Amino acid sequence: MKVSYKWLQEYVDLSGIRADELAEKMSRTGIEVDGVAKPGEGLSKIVVGHTLKVVDHPDSDHLHICQVDVGEEEPIQIVCGAPNIAANQKVIVALHGARIAGNYKIKKGKIRGEASHGMICSLDELGYSESVVPKKYADGIYVLPADTPIGDDVVSVLNMDDQVLELDITPNRADALSMRGVAHEVSAIYNKKAHFPNVEASETTGDIKDYIRVEVADTTDAPAYHIQVIKDVTIAESPLWLQTKLMSAGIRPINNVVDITNYILIEYGQPLHAFDYDKIGSKEILVRRATEDEPFTTLDGVERILDASNIVVTNGTEPIALAGVMGGLDSEITDTTVNVALETALFDALSIRRTGSKFNLRSESSARFEKGINVATLQEAGQKAAQLISELAGGTIVTGTASVNTIKPENVTVTITLERINRLLGTKISLEEVESIFDQLAFGHTLSDDVISVSVPPRRWDIRIEADIIEEVARIYGYDRLPSTLPVTAATPSELTKKQKLVRQSRNYLEAAGLTQNISYVLTTEENATGFTREEGQPVRLSWPMSEDRSTLRMNLLASLLENATYNVARKNSDIQFYEIGKIFLPNVGEVLPTESEQVAGILTGNIIEKDWQQEAVQVDFYHVKGILEAYFEAIGVSNAIRFEANSAINWMHPGRTADIILNDTVIGYVGQLNPGVSAKYDLKETYVFEFNLDSVLAVNKKVVTQQPIPKYPGTSRDLAILVAETVTHEQITAIITAKAGKYLTTVQLFDIYQGKGIEDGMKSMAYSLSFLNPSATLVDEEVTKAVEAVKEALISELNATIR
């Protein structure tokens, strides 16, 4: 919200208060001021000129030679290239030695052989943004009103000696989105009474019933809707005072009628809309919901396809405005408009927000409908706009207003005690001080049995409860005056929860294994949410996502890791080892909220060992990734409950290089190579991934890892070579060896696999080294032999193995 300091002074006496002091005071009392702009700062020797004669430059097809009266003894000659320059215009002239925007200095000189003693300026050259320059003068110089005195300082004429405060309004203080609202705030801060001019009645004619009637299909969509008609208007430029006020507020002047609606928007915070009455097409206004796929062309010339969530203003049948958002192209105010229908309304905030989001149409008007407006001045704002149109456009107001109104503005009463205020603020404010603060805020108040009843006017619709009143007292009293005290609380010793410890342990191990942590958004696309999960059900989708890329709560971590890997590989970082620990959100049938589950996932692609002068590069493979997980489960003490089983049914994984991670007969995740088709989609080479549920690991009783002394007695080992069917897995063999080799078996190591010459088709040779150790005595050969024989018998009987 841009606030003109001069405009504000029309409502509140700010004598002796500088703009920067006001900005600092407002920031300390709850409304932050981002900065104070001085539009005319640095401009000098820029005056009003009168073009006496304009002729074409003899050596140019676009330049003109102008004789300009600047209030001096003799006119000066200026060469100007503006397409709209003409004789008998009041223009902005930068004299020799003048400073314009950007600290650019104007000097005398010659242009194409003709002397030029200054410069005729556009508004852009004075520092105005292109977005606020009137459309008529967007590509040329700005022409001042004909009655502007020659030689006057342009900085004063255009009110550029004003100062503009940039307010950063929070959603709860939408009352300050108007000059009157800011005036109320300033009057409370400085304990000065705000004065607002009365709306004077203009001459009227006829009866509104003969011109238009209003109907609202559902008053929850439009609790208040008013239409006034102003006849016989003349569309023209607005007077200079109105244009400069709008430009200071960041709004482009259009014409007198449209500018008045924008002026009232800034003054009252009340959005208005002006229709060309003769283009409405009927004498009826119907406010209703749009029908499904109903077409409507807005002011910007774009056809919008509406639905039942959009409120429209119609002529009884066809839409003429997208309520609270944008008017229609067919009923806009143009230079040929004669009769105006002026709308003043209140629309449902939620519907306006949805419509604005759907069509990406956000405006000053829609923002105020969304955040709230002062319903007490709703009709007053419309009446003042009609009165100004009558004055500035020469129109006559039709008697009466066509209305549907269900609003009765009433003060809200909030009760509180002085003891409650002081206890929460830690102060010792007296009752007289509190009452004085309420007087400054212009809140009515009464005292009964130590209870203060505060009457809050409709202009402060943000105040509804006791806490709001306490906040008002605190900010007007002064936050800097509140005592500073440290809270007194009992010290509570704390430690990490089991889950926090496991997450930290997991993070430490995975990073020690060479993986880099990723932290990704929990929101993704619906395709990614469901594309890499074995869970059933529909994912949880946001009702109003900011974008489709962040519309759905994730059901897996792999999708985010794939996006991150692709991003890095595309930037020549091809050796990827990432992991993520985070929550996924699984649909919970019959419940409002989803089930949150902690997951661990990883992705590896490229080389795990770089090529150098000593060794060749080593590419990541299945066993490297599986080894990381085996060592991880060993480190956290659950390796005895973990096993891996081949699985060819996961559609995004390689069918021959994927295994389920099983914890005590429960599948908690998977590990393996990404399906080559999926890898190609993400522009990745051979890629390995894993993902498992950390909450399941947390629930298992973990083996306590303890340090053991170095054995006093020697161990021994035996090698065992067997011939088995190629379908037999290493997991099956080691399970039998572990079960049958007795209590002194310490490790089982596979050291050879062979298929080829001398081995029958469909068979494979596997060789294992079995290590034995008795920590309390020396092992004798008979004990080891007995254990190995038991293993051989079990392998023969259970796997039909041949001992080699």
Image (cartoon, rainbow, N blue to C red):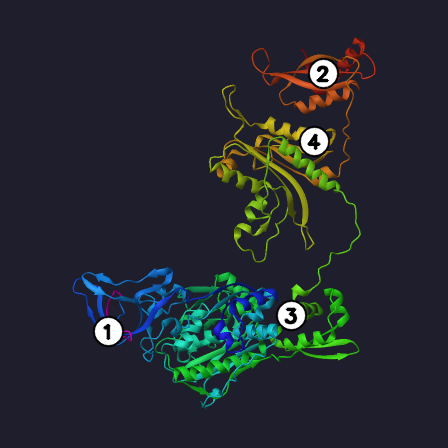
Q: Secondary structure at mark 3?
A: helix
Crowdedness of circle 1 by 10 Å Cα count: few (<14), some, many (20+)? some
Q: Secondary structure at mark 1?
A: loop
| Residue behind mark 3 | 476
- Label disc, if present, on residue 633 of the rendered structure: 4
- Callout in the foreground (3, 1): 1
What type is the residue that disc 1 sits on?
Answer: Pro
User: Label 1 to label 2, Cα distance in Å?
Assistant: 111 Å
Is 648 left or right of 497, judged from the image as shown?
A: left
Tag 4, which secondary structure? helix
Q: CA distance from mark 3 to mark 2?
A: 82 Å
Q: Is residue 513 visible?
A: yes
Q: How many residues crowd mark 3 within 10 Å: few (<14), some (14–19), many (20+)? A: many
Of pointers 3 and 2, the one earlier in the residue sequence: 3
- The numbered disc on residue 75 is 1
Residue, x 74% and y 64% (percent of image)? 426
**Amino acid type for the residue under numbered disc 4:** Phe
* Pointers 4 and 3 in contact (C-beta within 8 Å): no
- Distance from disc 4 to disc 2, alpha carbons, whole Å, reads 22 Å
Q: Which residues are magenta?
A: 68-82
Distance between mark 4 and mark 1 Cα atoms: 93 Å
Quadrant assignment, res 477? bottom right
**Amino acid beneath label 3:** Ile
Q: Nearer the viewer, mark 1 or mark 2?
A: 1
Task: Give coordinates of residue 698: x percent, y percent.
Answer: 73, 39
Tag 4–tag 2 contact (CB < 8 Å): no
| Quadrant of the rendered image containing residue 463 | bottom right
First-in-chain label (3 vs 1): 1
Q: Please, what secondary structure does the residue beneath circle 2 have?
A: strand
Counting from the top left corner in percent of width and height, residue 432 is at: 72, 76
Task: Work out whether mark 4 precedes mark 3 in sequence or the reverse, and give the earlier one.
Answer: 3
